[in-house]
Image (cartoon, rainbow, N blue to C red):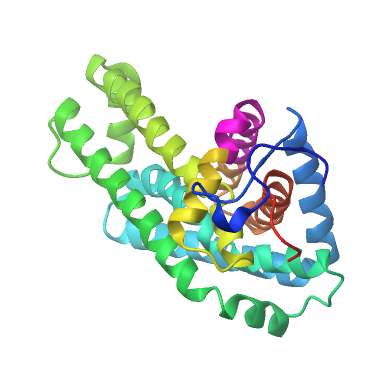
Amino acid sequence: MAGEDLSRPNAATHPLGFPVRRVALDAPWAWLAAGWRDLCANPVLSIGLGIIFTAGGWLLYWLLERQELVSLVPVLGAGFVLISPVLAAGLYEMSRLREKGQRVTLGAVVAGMRSAIGRLALFGVALFLAFFAWVQLAFLLLGLFLGEVAVPDPSQFVHTALFTNAGLALLFAGTILGAALAAMVFSISSIGAPLLLAEDVDTVTAMATSVRAAAANIGPMLLWAALIAGHMMIGLLTLFLGLAIILPLLGHATWHAFRALTVVDDI
């Protein structure tokens, strides 16, 4: 792992987490390529997990449709992106096992994740709070700009959002505030979840390391965030079908981002 260490080599005593590296601007493309190789090496387990995510998306859509809340699909879809880093823990473990030259099986993946369950659960709570804040923010913006006390009908909402001043203001404010929240969550979670899986560290240390890695690699991380957003958009626009491949690809690639950006002991 070539790169420039930006902090002391003794990660255990570093006050702001593990040392991190600077990477090239185009490094995210290499992470995606490595993630694709991991997916192709373990297609049954990887795509099987992706199918579970796809089924979850269909179930969510069905529940929202029954409650006449289909307009919430984009909001909850964006929220899913916020909590997805912790849901992809199994994919990180697959990539870790393959990196170590070990056989990748369901049993090995479950065994490898067992010791990190508590750490990942706590991290998941933090991401869920961000997800909850995003949903509440969406309802607040609806009330402020449209005076809505309930979720509008999809056709009515699309027309209002695109062809009225209040709707355009809502889109603008929602985009700005949503982007700010997403940037905050991305900075603490981009490599935080893989670090919690690989090392016996606390959540604060994992978050601090992730923030330092993002701050040291603003250009590459902006590209990585754009690639994630673009892939997730494709997954949502294909009625969740694309997520069966996209989520495993991004999960495996995130492991390689973690390995490229962070200086850790042999894992």
Q: Is residue 42 above or below residue 153?
A: below
Q: Quadrant of the C terminus?
A: bottom right
**Span highlighted in magenta in the image:** 213-231
Q: Nearer the viewer, residue 48 or 156?
A: 48
Q: Is residue 74 above or below residue 252?
A: above
Q: Is residue 78 above or below residue 108?
A: above
Q: Residue at x 33, y 30 (%)?
A: 177
Main secondary-structure element of the magenta-colored stretch: helix
Q: Nearer the viewer, residue 8 or 153?
A: 8
- Across and down, in percent, residue 135 comes to 29, 46
Q: How many marks?
A: 0
Q: Residue at x 67, y 48 (%)?
A: 262
Q: Residue at x 19, y 37 (%)?
A: 140
- Across and down, in percent, residue 189 comes to 51, 49
- Across and down, in percent, residue 68 comes to 27, 53
Asked if one can make out residue 229 in the rendered structure from this viewpoint, the answer is: no
User: Is 226 inside the magenta-drawn segment?
Assistant: yes
Asked if one can make out residue 211 in the rendered structure from this viewpoint, the answer is: yes
Q: Where, by quadrant of the figure, is residue 223 drawn?
A: top right
Q: Is residue 66 left or right of residue 230?
A: left
